[in-house]
Amino acid sequence: MVNRSDIHNIIVAGKSGAGKQPRIDVLVNEFGLTQLSTGNIFREYVGAFDASGFKGDLEGFFDEINDTFIKDEYIEKAIREQLPDLEHIRPVLLGLKAKYFMNLGRFVPDRTTNELFSEYFSKGGYKGFVLDGYPRTPEQAQFLLDLCSGNDTGMDLIVVVNNSDKLIIDRTIGRRICPSCKKVYHVEFKPSADGIHCDECGTELVQRSDDTVERIQMRLVEFYDKVIPALDVLEKTGIPVVTVEGNLEVFTEENVRRSVMEQIEPLLE
Ligand SMILES: [Zn+2]
C-alpha cells in the first residue's frame, strides 16, 4: 500500500493508439503531476538547436568507429566558436545529438535518448511526472532505475492502457485529420458532416502518413518486442503495475476517470 502523497512519478505505457492521453489527463489531475512526453523532450532540445542557428556538418561530431559522440567539451567548443553569445549551450548540444540521427533518418539510440531524458528529468527535480513514451526499451528502463536510485527518487506506479490490436488498427486506419485546424475525425465512428471536409474550417480531411496498416503493425511489433520487456525490468523491482481499459463503451470524462481510479485505489492507503 502506498500513500497517495507518496506517488511522485507514474509511468504510463500502452500500444500506440491505445488511448493513453485521456488516462494521462486523469493521472495529471488526480495526483497533481506534470506530463513528461519523450516527443516534447525531443521537440524542446531539437527546437533549441534549430533556434540557435548553428550551421555546418554534424558528422564531424560523431565517431562512427567507436559508435559514440566526441567529448561534450569538443562539441561545446565548436558551438561556442560559431555562437559566442549563446546563453544556454546545454540544450543546443543535446539537440545537436538528436538532430545528428534524425538527419540521417536513423532511430535515436538509447544512449542519446537517455541523455536527453535525464537532463529534462533533472531540471524538474526528478519528481512530479507522468512519464509518457519513456522508457520504451529494457536499456532505457535500466537507465531510469539507476538514475532514480542515484537521485533519491523512484517510479511509484506503472499504468498500462490496454487495447486490442484489432481495435487499434480499425480506429487508426479510419482516422482523418484536418490539416489546418488539426481536428480529428473517423470515417466510421466520428465522420464530418459531408465525410470529406472539416466541419470547423471546411478544409479537406487527410489521412496521416503514419496511419497505414503497415506503420501500425510496425508500432505494435515494437510494443511487444521492446516496451513489454522494458516493463518487465521495472516490474521485477517491485513497482506496482495496474492495467486500465483503453476502450470504454461510453466514453465520458467521468467514465475514464472512474475506470482508471478503480484500478489504482486498491493500492492506496
Ligand atoms: Zn479544420
Image (cartoon, helix red, strand yellow):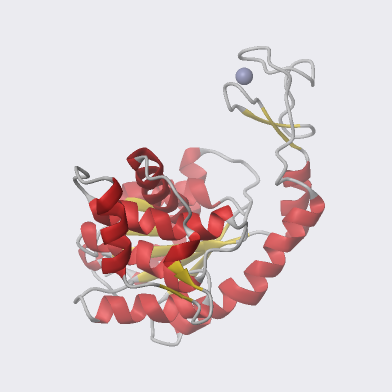
Viewed as shown, does residue 203 lie left or right of 148? right
Percent of width and height locating residue 14 = 57, 62
Residue at figure coordinates x 33%, y 46% from the top left: 29
Residue at figure coordinates x 48%, y 54% from the top left: 57
Viewed as shown, does residue 39 lie left or right of 249? left
Q: Quadrant of residue 124?
A: bottom left
- Relative vertical location of residue 76 with respect to residue 208 in this rendering, above or below: below
Q: Nearer the viewer, residue 120 or 20?
A: 120
Residue at figure coordinates x 58%, y 27% from the top left: 182
Q: Nearer the viewer, residue 242 or 76?
A: 76
Q: Quadrant of residue 214?
A: bottom right
Most extreme residue toward the bottom, as rendered? 236
- Relative vertical location of residue 171 with respect to residue 143 in this rendering, above or below: above
Percent of width and height locating residue 72 = 30, 68
Q: Nearer the viewer, residue 222 or 23?
A: 222
Q: Quadrant of the N terminus?
A: bottom left
